[in-house]
């Protein structure tokens, strides 16, 4: 169960990492004049990884007769990635209201990129806390031996005389 949970977490992280690139490619495809389904097909052909596989699965469901809204709603449910859920809900909302899909995709891509940057900054802030234990346990004793070792040897020689 531990290994399965670790693989699932790794897969979610890969999807989060791929999402900004996929969103940019989707935005460019829609702005170039492709329909949303054709843009999804183009993205799934041009990229690889778990997100491309999930997009291909969504396209397959749409082609088999499932409604686009239902197929898109299942995409974040299968992956479990919150950022993807936000993107899909915005796409569904704009398709129902009839707004500009390209603008929404551009805004969502910027939002995903911003969240990824914030996550990286958060991880960078946690790094010093995580490095304290190995530093105190392994590096400081080695430095003390190297620096204080010769001094200790000289002190021992003085006491022995």
Image (spheres, rainbow, N blue to C red):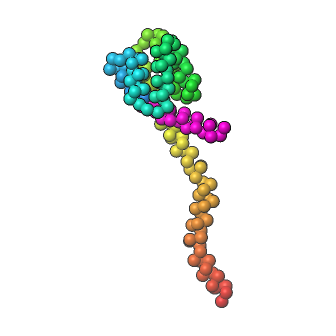
Can residue 27 be seen here? The reply is no
- Could you tell me which residue is drawn at 58 percent across and 62 percent down? 139
Left or right relative to 27: residue 78: right
Residue 20 included in the magenta stretch of the image: yes
Q: Position of residue 148 (x, y in %)?
A: 59, 73
Magenta residues, dominant SS class: helix
Left or right relative to 116: residue 102: left
- Could you tell me which residue is drawn at 54 percent across and 33 percent down? 12
Asked whether 71 or 144 is in front, the reply is: 71
Residue with the most extreme front position: 64
Q: Position of residue 28 (x, y in %)?
A: 36, 24
Q: Which quarter of the figure has residue 20?
A: top left
Can residue 95 be seen here? The reply is yes
Residue with the most extreme top position: 97
Residue 25 included in the magenta stretch of the image: no
Q: Which quarter of the figure has residue 27?
A: top left
Give the magenta range: 1-21
- Could you tell me which residue is drawn at 61 percent across and 65 percent down? 141
Quick check: 1 above or below 53? below
- Could you tell me which residue is drawn at 46 percent across and 19 percent down? 59
Q: Position of residue 61 (x, y in %)?
A: 50, 17
Asked whether 22 or 101 is in front, the reply is: 22
Quick check: 63 above or below 44? above
């Amino acid at each position: 169960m531990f290994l399965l949970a670790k693989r699932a977490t790794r897969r979610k992280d890969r999807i989060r990492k791929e999402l900004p690139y996929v969103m940019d490619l989707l935005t460019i495809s829609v702005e170039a004049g492709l329909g949303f389904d054709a843009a999804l097909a183009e993205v799934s052909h041009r990229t690889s990884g778990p997100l491309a596989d999930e997009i291909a699965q969504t396209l397959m469901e749409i082609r088999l007769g499932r409604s686009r809204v239902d197929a898109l709603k299942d995409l974040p449910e299968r992956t479990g990635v919150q950022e993807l859920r936000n993107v899909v809900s915005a796409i569904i909302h704009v398709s129902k209201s009839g707004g500009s899909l390209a603008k929404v995709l551009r805004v969502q891509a910027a939002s995903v990129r911003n969240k990824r940057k914030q996550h990286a900054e958060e991880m960078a802030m946690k790094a010093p806390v995580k490095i304290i234990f190995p530093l105190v346990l392994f590096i400081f004793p080695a430095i003390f031996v190297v620096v204080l070792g010769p001094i200790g040897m000289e002190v021992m020689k003085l006491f022995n005389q």
